[in-house]
């Protein structure tokens, strides 16, 4: 059956209504067909516009409110949906909402909603996994749930509940529900995309000052800010607004980034353009200058830190000159940057999940970075980085109570975790396993079945290892909007997830304001929202009451109840502009008043109660306590550099795409229709390459082909490649050299060579 009509992306933008089958015939066709093929031979751009996405122009418009989640899968920018005949015909920015305005991805979100390649019915696999041509046939939801329950319970009976894996990929909203169901089922094998995203940064902040953090944007009272690698202009445009306003207020910025990004050109007073992966040395140099020039807050260091003398001795050799040699950052720039931060303060540190985390040495280097605001006396002071509890929600607007963390603790899940020996530091802080060793856990028979929500095999280094692992599991069910052969060719079942505007969970929490999202339209076809599917799986597994029979509103009511706050779903419904939880005015130096520790004692929530410049958690677990810099495993200084002389820096965000997503949307695809590799003119000339050339990029791991973009945004010696292109997956070139503290892969610092294809 051919449900698609091939057109080019530009055809679709100019002639949307003239193409192909209607939405209704697609749904009917899909449901009635015996088999749905992946069409591996065709491209994901073979799409058409369903006429039914268009309403009669004269119908009345109703305005409904939702959020865009396209850049990070949490309720972000506020959206007003113009709804006609129960179809969203237009989206625009919601004024007065905490997050705005819409970027190109937000505006294009309607093309995703009405993309005819969405899967709209549960599907089961009918040919061999890993065949290269996955074939699925539609099944009912009842059959899907009955099969999942039977398979999971059989694995549990024979191998224990930990052999069933509960995973959320980039979609972060469903985490609370997924963790709850995993715990109810008795499995400690709950994991998420945080394994390779921001959690290395959170972990390091925890080790240094006892609180999860990726830093803080400068506030009204801040005078400076050290941005260590974030490129918000492209990764979080909504946030970039705030940073630009801070610049207008006169806040000074130091930006650490190997590239000349819009954050650098728009904000930086000093740009520290370092060699990717050399951050640990730059941070040591920063600290050296803070100490040598006596810029540190002496009272704070004396009373609230441990390990200062050891740190001072360690950084003594990291003089600006030596740091220049290692990092390629001119010595005078480093001196100037430290001076700006020290002389202006208080200010903030902003880190990111990308440059911040994707290195073999991140567990040490990122700790060194978090020590900078601590030494400068910026922690929990006006204009600095506020610490302490906000509302009792976690990162994905859920709660410890909803996730049943007391059950996890009381019933000894921690001791059974598969990752406990591999990544003991990670395991100490998170009730989710570090997933990078999934291939090993499957090979060893520790993981045998799983529910994989929004899973993308290309998110991990050395993609084929993960595809193989998913394939070798006895039974897996994926939840997605689309059928993605590079992942779903290896699963047994695929369930259709409802999109952003069709969902009600999760809650949106901004500061002390909580918003309830009401679906702007009903899910297309038989799609269901992720929370509902997970809770229905939980119900099928035998936990109907604890899973509210799949009722999402009841589950959200439980989330609210477990916050312990005085707020109900009805309160949220009565306050579409957000229900504000009253709070006391912000308090400074809460470490002195005992408000940062669960035991109410003064100090930070670390073993010593102090900011740990030498980490006790690490030394107790047999690691080095000081934040010692080590060269990346594959670096210009390593042996393989002779063969692969260019630094492979992958994953830096582009404004139009999110990971493997959104390539299907014509409005976005026109900006970057093909995979590109960015390289500096010097490196291009040396290889006889010009802009637009087709090139081979290769190293000891593998090879991909892309088109060259010759640009000064990248420094000489470095190539910059965005991830998530299934036709040119850069994770065929990245290595599984995991940082021992965090488990993170070195996406930012590998090696490669380039030549004309
Ligand atoms: N080389 C390299 N690799 C990287 C990175 C890098 O910088 N370089 N970055 C890493 C980081 S930080 C991250 S976060 C990961 C990205 O993590 P991934 O999980 O790889 O992200 P996506 O490509 O967005 O894939 C998510 C899948 O979920 C589906 N999906 C999207 N939204 C929903 C939803 O709401 N519900 C359901 N059920 N499915 C949905 C999409 O269609 C897609 O198939 O990649 C990591 N991998
Ligand atoms: N458009 C779009 N937006 C996104 C995403 C997306 O895929 N597309 N993904 C979302 C997700 S899951 C995440 S995690 C965030 C990431 O958000 P960001 O961290 O802002 O994104 P990146 O562009 O990956 O990385 C930031 C900067 O790190 C620099 N960098 C690279 N290597 C190094 C290094 O070795 N050291 C240092 N100091 N810096 C380095 C890059 O040059 C880049 O400019 O973006 C989110 N927003
Ligand atoms: S910044 Fe863009 S993609 Fe991200 S939530 Fe806002 S509109 Fe959506
Ligand atoms: Mo991420």
Image: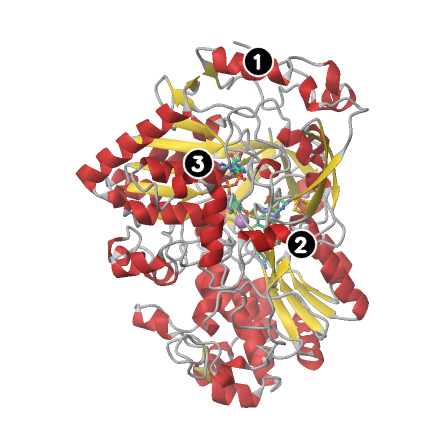
Q: Secondary structure at mark 2?
A: helix
Q: Residues within 10 Å of mark 1 (few under 14, many from 20)?
A: some
- Residues 636 and 259: in front is 259
Which residue bears the numbered disc 1? 3
Q: Which residue is mark 2?
A: 232
Query: Quadrant of the rendered structure where residue 43 is?
Result: top right
Please tell me whether residue 185 is drawn above or below residue 328 in the rendered image.
above
Residue sitting farthest toward the left: 158
* Position above or below: 332 against 484: below
Q: Position of 411 compared to 713: left or right?
A: left
Question: Which x, y percent locates residue 645?
Answer: 54, 47
In this rendering, is residue 200 above or below 674? below
Which residue position is annotated with label 3?
533
SS of the residue under disc 3: helix
Is any part of residue 745 visible from this angle?
no
Q: Quadrant of the C terminus?
A: top right
**Of callouts 2 and 1, the N-terminal one:** 1
Neighbour tally class for label 2: few under 14, some 14-19, many 20 plus, Cα within 10 Å: some
Packing grade of label 3 (10 A; few <14, some 14-19, many >=20) is: many
Separation (CA) of disc 1 from disc 3: 26 Å
Please tell me in which quadrant of the rendered image residue 658 appears.
top right
Q: Check contact, mark 1 vs mark 3: CB within 8 A.
A: no
Question: Which one is earlier in the sequence, the residue at label 1 or at label 3?
Answer: 1
Q: Nearer the viewer, mark 1 or mark 3?
A: 3
- Of tags 2 and 3, which is closer to the observer? 3
| The residue carrying mark 2 has its beta carbon less than 8 Å from ligand 2 | yes
Q: Can you tell me whether the CB of the residue at mark 3 lies under 8 Å from the nearest atom of ligand 1?
A: yes
Q: Distance from label 2 to label 3 (Cα)?
A: 33 Å
Pick whichever, 408 or 661, lies toward us: 408
């Amino acid at each position: 059956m051919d449900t698609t009509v091939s057109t080019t992306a530009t055809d679709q933008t100019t002639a949307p209504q003239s193409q192909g089958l209607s939405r209704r015939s697609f749904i009917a066709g899909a449901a009635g067909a015996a088999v749905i093929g992946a069409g591996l031979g065709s491209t994901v751009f073979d799409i058409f516009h369903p006429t039914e996405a268009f309403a009669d122009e004269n119908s009345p418009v109703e305005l409904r409110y939702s959020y865009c989640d396209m850049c990070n899968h949490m309720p972000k920018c506020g959206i007003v949906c113009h709804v006609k005949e129960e179809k969203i015909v237009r989206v625009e920015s919601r004024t007065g909402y905490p997050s705005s305005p819409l970027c190109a991805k937000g505006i294009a979100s309607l093309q995703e909603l009405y993309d005819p390649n969405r899967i709209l019915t549960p599907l089961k696999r009918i040919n061999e996994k890993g065949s290269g041509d996955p074939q699925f046939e539609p099944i009912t939801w009842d059959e899907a749930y009955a099969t999942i329950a039977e398979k999971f319970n059989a694995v549990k009976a024979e191998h224990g509940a930990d052999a069933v894996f509960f995973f959320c990929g980039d979609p972060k909203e469903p985490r609370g529900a997924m963790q709850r169901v995993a715990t109810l089922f008795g499995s400690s094998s709950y994991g998420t995309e945080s394994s390779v995203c921001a959690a290395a940064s959170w972990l390091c902040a925890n080790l240094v000052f006892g609180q999860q953090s990726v830093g803080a944007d400068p506030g009204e009272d801040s005078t400076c800010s050290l941005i260590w690698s974030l490129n918000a202009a492209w990764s979080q445009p909504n946030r970039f607004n705030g940073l630009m306003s801070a610049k207008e207020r006169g806040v000074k910025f130091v930006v650490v980034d190997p590239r000349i990004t819009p954050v650098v050109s728009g904000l930086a007073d000093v740009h520290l353009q370092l060699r990717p992966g050399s951050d640990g040395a730059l941070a040591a140099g920063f600290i050296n200058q803070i100490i040598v020039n006596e810029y540190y807050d002496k009272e704070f260091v004396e009373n609230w830190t441990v390990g200062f003398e050891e740190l001072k001795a360690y950084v003594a050799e990291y003089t600006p000159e030596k740091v220049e040699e290692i990092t390629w950052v001119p010595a005078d720039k480093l001196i100037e940057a430290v001076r700006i931060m020290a002389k202006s303060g208080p200010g903030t540190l902003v880190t990111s999940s990308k440059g911040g985390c994707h290195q073999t040495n991140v567990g040490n280097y990122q700790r060194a970075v978090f020590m900078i605001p601590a030494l400068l006396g910026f922690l929990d002071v006006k204009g600095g980085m506020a610490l302490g509890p906000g509302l009792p929600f976690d990162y994905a607007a859920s709660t410890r109570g909803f996730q049943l963390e007391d059950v996890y603790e009381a019933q000894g899940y921690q001791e059974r975790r598969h990752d406990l020996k591999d990544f003991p530091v990670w395991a100490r802080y998170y009730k989710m396993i570090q997933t990078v060793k999934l291939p090993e856990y499957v090979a060893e028979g520790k993981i045998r079945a799983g529910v994989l929500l929004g899973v993308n095999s290309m998110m991990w280094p050395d993609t084929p290892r993960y595809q193989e692992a998913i394939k070798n599991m006895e039974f897996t069910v994926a939840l997605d909007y689309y059928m993605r052969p590079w992942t779903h060719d290896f699963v047994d079942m695929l369930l259709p997830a409802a999109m952003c505007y069709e969902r009600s969970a999760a809650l949106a929490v901004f500061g002390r304001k909580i918003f309830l999202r009401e679906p702007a339209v009903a899910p297309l076809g038989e799609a269901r929202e992720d929370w509902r599917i997970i809770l229905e799986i939980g119900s099928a597994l035998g936990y109907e009451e604890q899973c509210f029979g799949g009722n999402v509103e009841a589950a959200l009511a439980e989330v609210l109840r477990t916050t312990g706050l005085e707020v109900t779903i009805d309160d949220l419904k009565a306050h579409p502009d957000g229900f504000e939880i009253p709070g006391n005015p912000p308090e400074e130096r809460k470490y002195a008043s005992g408000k940062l520790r669960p035991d109410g004692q003064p100090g930070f929530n670390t073993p010593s109660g102090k900011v740990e410049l030498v980490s006790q958690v690490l030394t107790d677990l047999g690691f080095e306590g000081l934040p010692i810099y080590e060269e990346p495993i594959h670096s210009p200084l390593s042996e393989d550099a002779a063969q692969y002389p260019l630094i492979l820096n992958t994953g830096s965000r582009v404004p139009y795409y999110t990971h493997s997503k959104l390539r299907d949307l014509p409005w976005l695809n026109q900006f970057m229709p093909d995979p590109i590799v960015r390289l500096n003119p010097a490196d291009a000339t040396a290889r006889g390459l010009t802009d637009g050339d087709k090139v081979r990029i290769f190293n000891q791991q593998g090879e991909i082909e892309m088109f060259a973009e010759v640009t000064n945004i990248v420094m000489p010696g470095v190539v910059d490649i965005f991830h998530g292109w299934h036709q040119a997956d850069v994770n065929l070139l990245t290595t599984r050299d995991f940082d021992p503290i965090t488990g993170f892969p070195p996406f930012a610092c590998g090696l490669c060579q380039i030549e004309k294809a």
